[in-house]
Image (cartoon, rainbow, N blue to C red):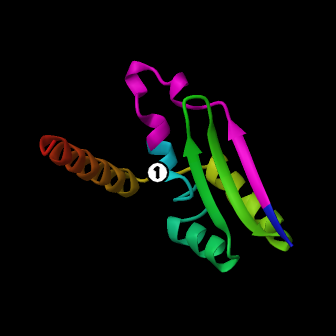
Amino acid sequence: MSSSIALFFHAGTRFEQPHNYGISHLIERLAFKSTATRTAAQVTHVLEDLGANVSISSTRELMTYNADILRVHVPTVMEVMADAIKNPQFTDEEIAEQLVRRRRYVDQVDMLMSCI
């Protein structure tokens, strides 16, 4: 039997202020990376070994953490999700990687828009 877990937080873009615009998107990109107790590789390894399909999404009103897993693995996946939510460790390297990816995305959009 499989299970789906969804954790909802009132933490969407609506709650951002001028000094932290874009933070919801950055948190979305850094979810399930390093925590205070696990490296990003350890988080990935645990979730992949269990066959978990995890994701995070953000909207104007909410951030949602999702996991689809076999029911027998619910306790372990819940523990990893709780660690990722309560103890994120946004490393300089992970932040820099996401900023590079965002810059590439913006550059691609600019290029496409110039062709219109």
Q: Position of residue 85 (x, y in %)?
A: 64, 48
Q: What's the residue at 28%, 50% (across, down)?
A: 105
Q: Quadrant of residue 23?
A: top left
Check the image and report above or below for 51 versus 13. below
Q: Nearer the viewer, residue 113 or 77?
A: 113
Direction left: furthest residue: 114
Q: How many marks?
A: 1
Direction top: furthest residue: 18
Residue type, label 1: Arg
Q: Nearer the viewer, residue 31 or 114?
A: 114
Q: What's the residue at 62%, 34% (across, down)?
A: 62
Q: Say whether residue 10 is magenta.
A: yes
Q: Position of residue 20 (x, y in %)?
A: 42, 28
Q: Quadrant of the N terminus?
A: bottom right
Q: Nearer the viewer, residue 5 or 37?
A: 5
Check the image and report above or below for 60 versus 95. above
In screen coordinates, is 33 left or right of 26? right
Q: Say whether residue 59 is magenta.
A: no
Q: Position of residue 14 (x, y in %)?
A: 53, 23
Check the image and report above or below for 88 versus 41. above
In screen coordinates, is 74 left or right of 68? right
Q: Which residues are magenta?
A: 4-25
Q: What's the residue at 59%, 56% (across, down)?
A: 55
Q: Quadrant of residue 12?
A: top right
Callout 1 crowding tier (Cα within 10 Å): few <14, some 14–19, many ≥20:
some
Q: Quadrant of the C terminus?
A: top left
Q: Quadrant of residue 115?
A: top left
In screen coordinates, is 106 left or right of 37? left
Direction bottom: furthest residue: 49
Q: Position of residue 96 (x, y in %)?
A: 32, 52
Q: Which residue is mark 1?
A: 29
Q: Secondary structure at mark 1?
A: helix
